[in-house]
Amino acid sequence: MEEKSMVRQLPSVDEILRWPETASLIASYSRGIVVNAARRVLDRLREEILSGCREEVSSSEIIARLRQEVRPRLQRVINATGVVLHTNLGRALLSQRAQEAVKTAVAHYTNLEFNLATGKRGERYSLVEELLCLLSGAEAAMVVNNNAAAVLLALNTLAAGREVIVSRGQLIEIGGSFRIPDVMRQSGAILVEVGTTNKTHRRDYREAITERTALILHVHMSNYRIIGFTSEVPVPELVALAREYNLPVMSDLGSGSLIDFSRFGLPYEPTVQETVKAGVDVVTFSGDKLLGGPQAGIIVGRREYVERMKRNPLNRALRIDKMTLAALEATLRDYLEEEEALRSIPTLKMLLCPSEELREKAERLAQMLGSLEGIAVQVIEGFSQVGGGAMPTAQLPTWLVAVTAAPLGESALLKALRRADPPVIARAEKGMVVLDPRTFSEEEIPLLVEAFKQVLAGG
Ligand SMILES: *Cc1c(COP(=O)(O)O)cnc(C)c1O
């Protein structure tokens, strides 16, 4: 039983804790974390030995595994995918000011729900409501945990037990299982689908209106497009129709933007301001998509509806946290002057980064990687994506650093990069691994080089 004797030769947790390398881990994390991690590492090694898939175990390997194991599970990664609003990588990055606002909000007591003028209880939304009204042109505003929650709260408040009319072409699913029909059911509202997948007319809406109708819902088809023989009823026409019957109109803008990106050569997306101006009564959108702020669901619209939503008991379960509120306020303040927003908000900077700058960054990385033994590097033209279900058809021209590291194939190289410290997330294209400078920063170039060094050293 050679395996049994190998198991007996494994060090004990106590022995591991006495190793000098372990002492530094205990200093940077805590004894509890390291003890726990050591147990898990030993358990796994024991299993591997007993299942016969190991010949030997070295102490340096135990240390390497221990290092992996003690790292916090939520880690910084380098986004080299070129997908700006990568939902799986945390969507929008916050501006410097927003980061500082979060720090202040968590390190100190705040007037989160305290009116400093009266000394009485205040309303947490009041901190951003004024800004949101100013920026959107709406009468009232509030914020919840994310846009899915905003849609749920709005439907529940305005239409529980009654009917909501939606075009079939707008019954969308967003990644992470947000589906309009499901949210509708959860809210207690009754879905009335009108039109067909590709065409919905004004008369389809009109014919569906009954005394049970509570709301006409418009959903921005954020993450897909129907092209060809299609028609949707434009929002202003929906508003005109709803007015005839004294019904409210709600628009789920999805991404929602305060800036008209078509001015910069990007695809047109309806802005929050123009949606409000068109007379839509309730508009919902995300805080961490094109807005470039924290995860949040923003609701702007007519006061009577927003006030009802604030009073809905469901709201207590969906409410926004103080860190988010701090980050959102700081982000919105930047939008008071568009130039400032474009200068400070990382999402906007990435989306609008000039081609020259991308090319220079790509060249700089390529040059540094090119000096490493064992890899071939070139700079090629390619495309980045907006992500987050926004502007799905937008192809943003970029310059890519394309790398091959024979004998590693592209998927082995991608995997090795994911295991580097910090992990690098890239993508494969035409048999090469490509790194898009749109989504990594100048400061991350040395870290990328370091990651490649680790990959090449580890084989
Ligand atoms: C993204 C999106 C949502 C969900 O927003 P979250 O902030 O991710 O909850 C809802 N509706 C539309 C149209 C979207 O694009």
Image (spheres, rainbow, N blue to C red):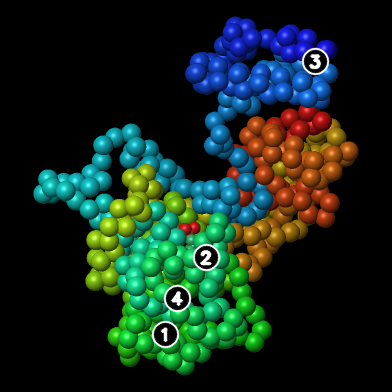
Q: Nearer the viewer, residue 190 or 253?
A: 190
The spot of residue 116 in percent (x, y) is: 16, 46
Report the Cα–Cα distance between label 4 and label 3.
63 Å
Please name the residue that numbered disc 4 is placed on: 191
Report the Cα–Cα distance between label 2 and label 4.
12 Å
Instruction: Give the left or right position of residue 398, taking residue 219 as reference.
Output: right
Could you classify mark 3 by the number of other residues whose Cα lies within 10 Å: few (under 14), some (14-19), or many (20 or more)? some
Report the Cα–Cα distance between label 2 and label 3.
52 Å
Say which residue appears at 49% left-offset and 69% top-offset: 181
Nearer the viewer's eye, disc 2 or disc 3?
3
Disc 3 secondary structure class: helix
Instruction: Give the left or right position of residue 432, taking residue 135 as reference.
Output: right
Above/below status of 214 relative to 204: above
Q: Nearer the viewer, residue 99 or 392?
A: 392
Q: Are marks 2 and 4 in contact (CB under 8 Å)?
A: no
Report the Cα–Cα distance between label 1 and label 2.
22 Å
Which image quarter is the C terminus in?
Answer: top right
Above/below status of 224 relative to 423: below
Could you classify mark 1 by the number of other residues whose Cα lies within 10 Å: few (under 14), some (14-19), or many (20 or more)? many
Q: How many marks?
A: 4
Say which residue appears at 49% left-offset and 68% top-offset: 180
Please name the residue that numbered disc 1 is placed on: 238
Q: Is mark 1 within 8 Å of ligand 1?
A: no
| Residue 3: mark in rendering | 3
Q: Amino acid at mark 3?
A: Glu
Please name the residue that numbered disc 2 is placed on: 179
Report the Cα–Cα distance between label 4 and label 1.
17 Å
Could you classify mark 4 by the number of other residues whose Cα lies within 10 Å: few (under 14), some (14-19), or many (20 or more)? many
Q: Are marks 4 and 1 in contact (CB under 8 Å)?
A: no
